Image (cartoon, rainbow, N blue to C red):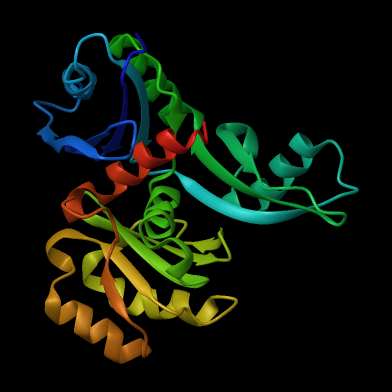
Amino acid sequence: MARSVVYIGIDLLPDRACYVGLGAKGETLFGGQKPFHDPASWNETIAEILAEVPLKSKLVWGIAPSFASGVSRSFFVPAEAQPLSEYVRWETGLYLGADSKEFAISWDKLPRTPEGRMVNVVAVRKKEMEAFAVSLERVGAEPDLVESRLFAAANAVEFAQGAAAPKVYSVLVQEGALLRFGFVQNGTMPLQSQTLLRADSADERIAEFLGRAPAPSEAFFAQAGDWFDEERRRSLSDAHGIPVGELPRAEGVDLQLAVAWAVAHRCKEGAL
């Protein structure tokens, strides 16, 4: 008899892990948040989450870690640019403001066209990534997917709204006491905040980003804790003349679990 499949998405924040488990049909099986006992114990928390999978089930899991140095970027690679890996590292280095050799870089390739293809790139400082890898080893199981939190937030919009999702929009996610902003256009993220934003200056910085974006946003989605209250939502909507709302997710999934839900959903979609 075939084993049931459980897909788990984990949103790893500086002080806690948010997680969602989905069944074979995408139904929500469980979810919640687990705080860390101390900064070095998050691997124990991950192990506790994975242990919630029913016995004899097949486990597929992914994680979206909060890296202070993390940068996500989408850009076009011309067809004549060969080899692809060298071009991606060169292009990424232009955005990093540092030697790309200091970063661990991974990317997803979009479908090829005669002119070339888009790639979604994630770069994290190697020292930070190495510490993350050591902690993963202590968990005793390798993730099937490691995702950027901003890309996961964009995926939440696409998964939850489907064909109704706007073609051009902005997302904001909270990482601890700080915020990170991204601009999405036709499924790629050509613009994001290179550094985390302080909440007390976020309004001004968001306005700057929207002003620099290559196209006007049709909507704005946020997962930003207490900072994103109803007054803030109305203020952003009035200031920029666009709909502003919470990060979309499946019915019954709490807003704080929206990123984790998107990671679990991507595991289910097989984009590993």
Task: Give the quadrant of residue 227.
Answer: bottom left
Residue 204 position within the rendered picture, expressed as x and y whole percent measured from the top left:
33, 79
Q: Residue at x 47, y 57 (%)?
A: 194
Q: Nearer the viewer, residue 186 or 207?
A: 186
Up/down of 56 relative to 219, above or below? above
Query: Seen in the image, is 140 located left or right of residue 32?
Result: right
Residue 206 position within the rendered picture, expressed as x and y whole percent measured from the top left:
37, 74
Residue 22 position within the rendered picture, expressed as x and y whole percent measured from the top left:
27, 35
Q: Residue at x 84, y 35 (%)?
A: 83
Q: Nearer the viewer, residue 15 or 1?
A: 1
Up/down of 241 relative to 268, above or below? below
Query: Seen in the image, is 29 located left or right of residue 205?
Result: left
Task: Give the quadrant of residue 74.
Answer: bottom right
Task: Give the quadrant of residue 222.
Answer: bottom left
Q: Is residue 67 visible?
A: no
Q: Nearer the viewer, residue 238 or 88?
A: 238
